[in-house]
Image (spheres, rainbow, N blue to C red):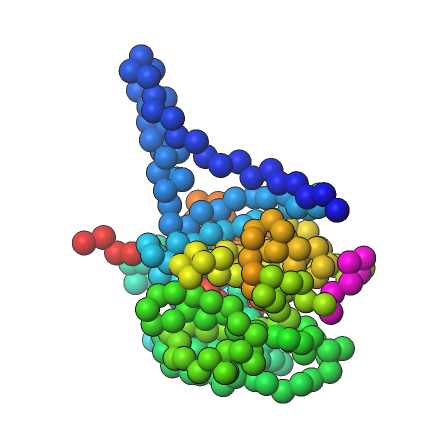
C-alpha cells in the first residue's frame, strides 16, 4: 500500500540584509529548533497521525527512571518525574513510557537503571493471549556504557552478554533484522494507542507513539517503511504517552493513562 508523510523539515535560509529584525530573529529561532538534539515531529502514515521523536545520543543522554532515589517510591507518571527534575534543577526535554509491567506495577522483564540490574531478563514463554509481552519474540532496548543504543531480541541480547547502562525489556518486537514480525495480521481489528522505539544508528534513537488507535501491523510498518528501522521494539499500548518540552503530551488521552513502571527521559545537560 502507498505511504505518505506530512513531515515538514525546518529550513533555515540566510535572511537578506533588508529583512526586518523580527524576521531575522524568527529565522535564527527556526535554525535553533532544527539543531536540537531532541527533535519532535508529527508524521502521517497510512492516513494515521504519529508523534515521532528523534534523540541524538551524541548530544544528550537518554536515561531510564522507575523510583525516586530520595524516598524509593515509584514516580508513576511523567509529570512526577518532571517535577522531580525541576526540584533538582534539571529541565525535562522528553519522556516516554518504558516497557510492559506486571500486576504489582514492576517491570515484567529486564530493567537496568544506571548500570544496576533491578529486574533480570525474562525468557519465559507465556501464553500470547495473556499479553503482548508473550507475543514472541520480545526484545530489549539498551543503552551501553559507551553511549550507543541498540534493539535486540531477548535471546540475542542474552547471547551478546555485554553490560548495559540502561535497558528495558518489552514485547513484541515490531521489526526484526529488517522484516516485520510475522505474528502481525495486516487487517487486524485490534486497535490501540501504541508506542515503540528503535536505534536507527548507534547514536540516533527514534521513538514513536500513535495519536489514535492503530493495529500492530501498521505500527510496525511505520518503523520499517517510514522511519527506516531494521530492529524496532514495542513499548506498550493504550496507556502510552510522550512528553516533549514546549509541546506538551502526545499519544493516549490522559484519562487512559495508568502509572508507569519505568520512564525514558532526556534532561537538558547542565550549563557550565
Residue 116, above or below 250: below
Magenta: predominant secondary structure element? loop
- Left or right relative to 231: residue 134: right
Pinpoint residue 64: horizontal percent, then vertical percent: 43, 69
**In the image, which residues are magenta?**
183-188
Q: Nearer the viewer, residue 143 or 240?
A: 143
Q: Which of 5 and 38 is in front in this view?
A: 5
Residue in the image at 42% along x and 61% along y: 202
Pinpoint residue 88: horizontal percent, then vertical percent: 30, 63
Residue 254, above or below 173: above
Residue in the image at 53% along x and 36% along y: 8
- Left or right relative to 243: residue 18: left
Is residue 186 found inside the magenta-colored segment of the image?
Answer: yes
Is residue 40 found inside the magenta-colored segment of the image?
Answer: no
- Left or right relative to 24: residue 94: right
Residue 8, above or below 86: above
Q: Nearer the viewer, residue 191 or 43?
A: 43
Amino acid at each position: 500500500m502507498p505511504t505518505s508523510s506530512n513531515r515538514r523539515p525546518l529550513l533555515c535560509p540566510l535572511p537578506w540584509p533588508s529583512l526586518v529584525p523580527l524576521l531575522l530573529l524568527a529565522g535564527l529561532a527556526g535554525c535553533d529548533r532544527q539543531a536540537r538534539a531532541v527533535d519532535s515531529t508529527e508524521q502521517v502514515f497510512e492516513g494515521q497521525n504519529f508523534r515521532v521523536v528523534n534523540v541524538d545520543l551524541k548530544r544528550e543522554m537518554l536515561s531510564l527512571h522507575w523510583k525516586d532515589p530520595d524516598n524509593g517510591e515509584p514516580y508513576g507518571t511523567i509529570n512526577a518525574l518532571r517535577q522531580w527534575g525541576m526540584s533538582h534543577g534539571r529541565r525535562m526535554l522528553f519522556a516516554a513510557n518504558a516497557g510492559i509491567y506486571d500486576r504489582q506495577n514492576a517491570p515484567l522483564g529486564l530493567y537496568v537503571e544506571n548500570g544496576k540490574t533491578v529486574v533480570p531478563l525474562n525468557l519465559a514463554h507465556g501464553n500470547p493471549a495473556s499479553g503482548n509481552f508473550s507475543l514472541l519474540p520480545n526484545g530489549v532496548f539498551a543503552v551501553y556504557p559507551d553511549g550507543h543504543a541498540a534493539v535486540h531480541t531477548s535471546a540475542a541480547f542474552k547471547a551478546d552478554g555485554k553490560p548495559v547502562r540502561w535497558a528495558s525489556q518489552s514485547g513484541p518486537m515490531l521489526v526484526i533484522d529488517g522484516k516485520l514480525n510475522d505474528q502481525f495480521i495486516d487487517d487486524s481489528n485490534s486497535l490501540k494507542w501504541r508506542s515503540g522505539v528503535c536505534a536507527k544508528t548507534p547514536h540516533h534513537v527514534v521513538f514513536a507513539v500513535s495519536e489514535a488507535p492503530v493495529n500492530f501491523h501498521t505500527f510496525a510498518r511505520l518503523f520499517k517503511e517510514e522511519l527506516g528501522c531494521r530492529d524496532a521494539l514495542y513499548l506498550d499500548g493504550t496507556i502510552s504517552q510522550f512528553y516533549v518540552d514546549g509541546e506538551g503530551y502526545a499519544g493516549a488521552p490522559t484519562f487512559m493513562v495508568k502509572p508507569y513502571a519505568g520512564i525514558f527521559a532526556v534532561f537538558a545537560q547542565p550549563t557550565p
